[in-house]
Image: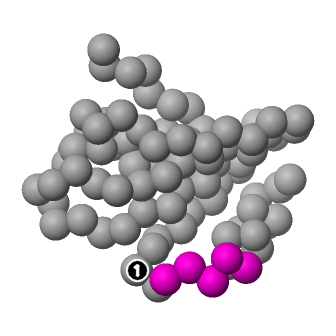
Amino acid sequence: MDEAEVRRTLAALHLDPAIRTEAKADGGRVGALLSVNGNGLDVQDCLLARVSPGATEVWVPPRIQRMSGEGGCTVGNALDPKPSPH
């Protein structure tokens, strides 16, 4: 599955407009992010996915990574997940 196909799949879900989606390809893998805008104070809500040949992984980053400024809710974190802080 390539980046264009992941983008088409996300668009076909007809998600609420408040849900932001991103997709990015890197080295035969595609990372995907689904998130909603937070208030900047509370934990960010997001879902990450990584699609690679023969495997698809979907997860929610640990709470600490979803705090404001921690960068857990990014398409980059979908491609190269940050290690758990604990």
Q: Name the residue beneath numbered marker 1.
A: 18
- Label count reads 1
Residue 15 highlighted magenta (yes or no) = yes
Please provide the residue range marked out in magenta: 12-16
State the residue in front, 29 or 14: 14
Drawn side of residue 49 relative to residue 62, left or right: right
x then y, percent, for residue 38: 24, 65
Q: Is residue 19 above or below residue 66?
A: below
Dividing the picture into quadrants, the one containing residue 13 is bottom right
Give the residue drawn at x 63%, y 83%. Answer: 14
In percent of width and height, residue 21 lies at: 53, 67
Q: Position of residue 52 (x, y in %)?
A: 79, 39
Q: Going 15% across and 60% down the picture, which residue do you hit?
A: 40
> Which amino acid lies under the numbered mark 1 shown in the image of this protein?
Ala
Give the image quarter of residue 50: top right
Q: Is residue 56 left or right of residue 64?
A: right
Q: For mark 1, give the secondary structure.
A: loop
- Vertically, is 39 above or below 48? below
Crowding near the residue tagged with mark 1, few <14, some 14–19, many ≥20 C-alpha atoms within 10 Å: few
Q: Quadrant of residue 19?
A: bottom left
Asked whether residue 34 is in view, the answer is yes
Residue pushed farthest top? 86
- Residue with the most extreme left position: 41
